[in-house]
Image (cartoon, grey):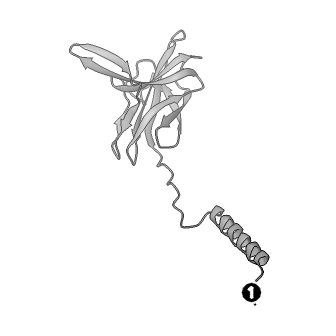
Amino acid sequence: MNPSPLSFATSRRAALLALCLIALVPHPLTAQPAPAAPVRADQPWARATAPSQSVGGAYVTLTSPVSDRLLGGSSPVAGRVELHEMRMDGAIMRMRELGEGLPLPANTPVAFAPGGYHLMLVDLKQPLVAGQTVQVTLRFQNAPPLDLVLPIAPVGAPGPHAHK
């Protein structure tokens, strides 16, 4: 006995529908992208500013477990956060913005310190006051954003543990 053409078409549609539904269900062996590794921040700090100063400097040492790139940041107390580098050009100290970001080689600490790389908090909405803290969020090419709370050292402090 042969199946009727109608029942064959119906069972074929049902099989096709079942295959489509199976394709939509995530398979446990399907490769999922690995989450980006977080960047570690050591000794974050900022320098206090004068009441009328519109920019401030912030510093930190960043270490990424994989090669990445620091792209920039933000802060509730600044219009924008820029990446800058200071370096000697002959006998003249020059500062420039790192518009393309800063590479973070795998497992290699990259220090932001006075006279070198630094975060420039531009268009400050309020002064940075010694003894208080400032929040900064850093953005990376691959790693998740990094929220930091930076203690504020006195004006001219050489490092995070300077006292008045």
Q: Image check: 92 left or right of 143? A: left
Q: Residue furthest bottom?
A: 1
Asked if residue 14 is positioned above or below residue 81 in the image, the reply reads below
Quarter of the picture containing the C terminus is top left
Q: Residue at x 53, y 58 (%)?
A: 32
Q: Image check: 154 left or right of 1? A: left
- The spot of residue 43 in percent (x, y) is 43, 36
Q: Image check: 57 left or right of 15? A: left
Label count reads: 1
Asked if residue 161 is positioned above or below residue 145 in the image, the reply reads above
- The spot of residue 81 in percent (x, y) is 50, 24
Res. 86 image quadrant:
top left
Secondary structure found at label 1: loop
Q: Residue furthest top?
A: 52
Quarter of the picture containing the N terminus is bottom right
- The spot of residue 90 in percent (x, y) is 20, 15
Res. 58 image quadrant:
top left
Q: Residue at x 73, y 69 (%)?
A: 13
Res. 94 image quadrant:
top left
Considering depth in this image, is 130 or 104 the residue closer to the camera? 104
Read off the residue under disc 1: 2
Crowding near the residue tagged with mark 1, few <14, some 14–19, many ≥20 C-alpha atoms within 10 Å: few
- The spot of residue 112 in percent (x, y) is 38, 30
Q: Residue at x 67, y 64 (%)?
A: 20
Asked if residue 155 is positioned above or below residue 68 in the image, the reply reads above
Name the kind of residue labelled 1 in the image.
Answer: Asn
